[in-house]
Image: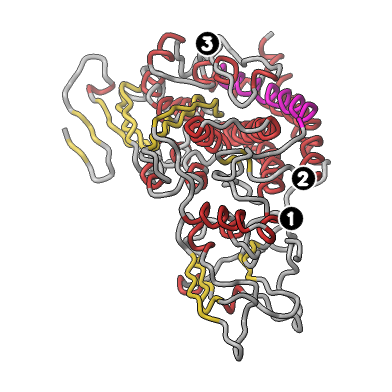
Amino acid sequence: MSVFSDVAALLVGLKTTLGETFKPHVTVQWPEEKSVRSERYRGRHYLRRYDNGLERCIGCELCAAACPVGCILVIAAENTAENRVSPGERYAKVYEINMLRCIFCGYCEEACPVQAIVLGPEYELSNVSREQFIYTKEMLLEPSPQQPPLYAGKKSQH
Amino acid sequence: MSSSPTGVTISREPAEGHVGGELLTVNFGPQHPSTHGVLRLVVILDGEVIRGVRPVIGYLHTGIEKQMEALRWQQGVVVTDRHDYLSPLHNNLAYAMAVERLVGVEPPPRAQALRVIMCELTRISSHCLWLGTSSLELGAMSMFMYCLRERETVLAMNEEISGYRMHTSYIRPGGVMADATERFWDMLADFVEKMPGHVDEYEDLLTNNPIWKRRTVGIGYLSAEDAVRLGASGPMVRGSGLPWDLRKTMPYSGYEKYDFEIAVEEAGDCYARYLCRIKEFRESVRILKQAMASIPDGPINVDERKMLPPPREELETSMEAVIHHFKLFTEGYSVPSGDVYAAVESPRGEHGCYVVSDGTHKPRRVKFRSASFVNLQALEHMAMGSMIADMIAMIGTADTVLGDVDR
């Protein structure tokens, strides 16, 4: 009888859903609970420093050239003896990332020859106005070694 | 004929057999939740019976093909992720294969195996989303949650290997982005062990369910001849009894090494297409198991310094490497002039990428032959004479992604 087989099929389905009730939950109760991001996660950018406090960025603009959407603006300036910011000849005077345009492809990180820019694990980047999505150098740069680090670097130090 | 601002048109020409002597033209979409995005269908109705369907597309047009002309060869990968957002890895692969053929390089075996693994995982995640949403639309609420649970594990694996959940840009011309981590292999081993059990769960809930069967069996019939005539591919044509799967018929990326079967169903209706995709879940797991067990060692990128950046260690010691690195990220590499078509079997069918190069560092033209677009034109054929409520099941099993249709 097809009625019996139909009822049997529905009961099999009900058994599955009922069995699910007693299994552990898989839902993560964000934002109270947070899932763990992977080592390679491509989230918010950071500009790193060397251990002696000098900035890694040498203002070569390779990140801006590699960016497929053109969201990075770098304006370089010369290092002088009085004002030494990075170990090279130049440093980034202006470093801005437009987070509304950024697609988090990670090409800037890959292009950077001195591993100055890295993509960190932070992904909760909502904000209330467009202006606040222009991340300036002050927002991106890691604090100097005296202060606790913003993000303790997933990339090898060298 | 009178029309109202709501888009409902009533034609008053009296005709024999029509309910009340009237045909009703209704907009189905573009904001209808069951149209999987922004598909607009102008449906001509006789009572509740469909007498004509005209898809109106372009609501999700993003100009992706045009954008790629402005990007260098290696930058184009990030855009291919974004048109068919449910199978980004297949889009990457088609583009990467086209560029590799033009350049004349062959990715190393380990890269090919990693590509197969990621593509099959993407197929599972895409089918999970398809099954979840399509059954939700037909009333099976819990299916959506179960399917997204498995999709989540695949996305976590995407994140582990590439750093991003959906727009991975993992496959690139010349190889893949990075090698798999130990944690990825553990996650994958766990996944292939559990996934067949989850597919059994889906089948328990749907395959014999009388409500599901009544909504899908005999609905949206597409004969094999019509499927071929309309250019359909993927589960649309395999559900009509044609064993056409590019992984078997035109193997790429080393698919010929794996033992799997083409999922074919004879009936040609929505239920057959559902069964077809359920079989593909199992076949994908089979391929994953074999690929895991037989993954060769070796490099993951071609040994071609003009195409891929040099290893990071060399930047500190070799001036040559620094020059290559800077050259690659500013000017890019140029590809010999010519044109090439590369096709992969995406979860929706044949996804092709036609690339024209004029010998410079940017493509002259990139054209995608997207399975969603071509499968969509079979919709009118399937829908003729059936009830308006069955339209949902037909759109569901056609599995179109509107980003892929409009590009």
Task: Point out the image quarter for the C terminus of chain B.
Answer: top left
Mark 3–mark 2 contact, CB under 8 Å? Answer: no
Residue B144, image x, y percentages = 63, 38
Span highlighted in magenta in the image: B271-296
Q: Which mark is residue A39?
A: 1
Which of B183 and A77 lies nearest the eye of the viewer? A77
Which of B42 and B360 lies nearest the eye of the viewer? B360
Res B311 seen here: yes
Task: Point out the image quarter for the N terminus of chain B.
Answer: top left
Q: Which mark is residue B242?
A: 3
Q: Quadrant of residue B297?
A: top right
Please identify the residue farthest to the front as the structure is shown.
B319
* Chain of the residue on which disc 1 is drawn: A
Q: Amino acid at mark 1?
A: Glu
* Chain of the residue on which disc 2 is drawn: B
Residue A80, image x, y percentages = 57, 86
Which of B241 and B268 lies nearest the eye of the viewer? B241
